[in-house]
Amino acid sequence: MNVSDDFEDAASTIACHAGSHQTAEFENSDPIFVTSSFSFENAAQAAARFSGEEIGNVYSRFTNPTVRAFEQRLAALEGGECAVGTASGMSAIMTLCLGVLAAGDHVVCSYSVFGSTINLFKNILAKFGIEFTFVDLIDQQAWKDAIRPNTKLLFLETPSNPLTEVADISALAAIAHESGSLLVVDNCFCTPILQRPLSYGADIVIHSATKYLDGQGRCVGGAIVAPKTLVEEKLIPVLRSGGASMSPFNAWVFLKGLETLAIRVEQHCRGAAIVAAWLTEQVQVKQVYYPGLPDHPQHKLADRQQSGFGGVMAFEINGGREKAWRVIDSLRLFSITGNLGDTRSIVTHPATTTHSRVSAEDRARSRIGEGLIRISIGLEEPEDLVADLAAALTN
């Protein structure tokens, strides 16, 4: 069922209906096709399916109806042509890079990205002759200066992890396209409910479905939203041979997660706004990083580019690691884990978890200090979270 054309702006409607294909059993909820392979009517059909002459299911590593339903629903939400589901958010980035890059190609990336993204680029893909330059996310001139004749991708997160810096997607898209490069935006923090990068000129959107798209911390998965030609010619071959595929069960969980995404994100945003405003008034807190705060350096840009400010923030406290760990250990409603986007609120110490494998020099350049704490606001009552934080800050 394709509802995206008729209900272009109704994200909640698209999230409940896009990609659904009712079978002969007339099920009301999307089914799970838990099968490794698919049978054929005859040998000729099998040959045609394997060669691509006939469209149809072949093997769940690269064709599965449940995964396809998730891909179609997410693509509709992002306003994209096509999507590819992968085993994790990191495998989505790896699949994209293996599909569109070759030895000698160059990528410009923001310093302000997830630690594993930096490690994938610097320590793994660089071994195969792909070159990377890292720049300040909000310094547009730095992006321009970093571009070379062999630049193929500009890669960024906005808002960034963990300091919630906001990049001007339209401006960076213009820079990328002027040089013949593709702009890739990791939209994990906002989801298509709050931000649709393709509408601002981005070419490709990356997701860790593990986070808000699931929303309950159940499954690991990722996705790439991109033009149909790029998906079919560049990404599916990597997925088919490389096998970084999303499982049918996980795809079904993500389908169910998307159906409640809009109402969950609304509550995340409401709670985060209350908690962020309260944190700014605490003497133990040196600085709060949240785009919804009027004094955030990119607040006006976020207000224009996003329809809400999200559920993730970071704050820096006096006392370095010792005090940060004491605060974290004193919290009762916040789970100590590296995930985000869950129904339950989450707290982590980026310098020793999500960015622990990043060099000290890169952490300093990204302003990830020992006193920095990142929190992801869940669906609890914000007043209860404030009370929990108040008690922890006094320990």
Image: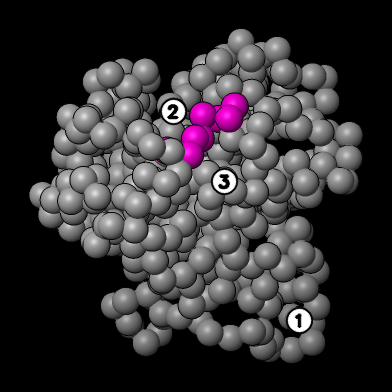
The residue singled out by tag 2 in the image is 165
- SS label for mark 2: loop
Q: Residues within 10 Å of mark 3 (few under 14, many from 20)?
A: many
Q: Which residues are magenta?
A: 364-371
Q: What distance separates the C-alpha of mark 3 from that of mark 2?
A: 16 Å
Horizontally, residue 76 falls left or right of residue 259, namely: right
Q: Which mark is residue 46?
A: 1
In the foreground, 282 or 131: 282
Type of colouring? one colour
Q: What distance separates the C-alpha of mark 2 from that of mark 1?
A: 50 Å
Q: Is residue 108 magenta?
A: no
In the image, what residue type sits under mark 2?
A: Glu
In the foreground, 289 or 258: 289
**Location of residue 366 by image quarter:** top right
Q: Position of residue 63 (x, y in %)?
A: 63, 71
Task: Tell me if residue 52 comes above or below residue 183 in the rendering.
Answer: below
The residue singled out by tag 3 in the image is 355
In the image, what residue type sits under mark 1?
A: Ala
Q: Position of residue 236 (x, y in %)?
A: 70, 58
Name the residue located 77 percent from the left edge and 46 percent from the top edge.
123
Mark 3 or 2, closer to the camera? 3
Task: Tell me if residue 76 comes above or below residue 247 in the rendering.
Answer: above
Instruction: State the quadrant of the N terminus.
Output: bottom left
Horizontally, residue 69 falls left or right of residue 143, namely: left
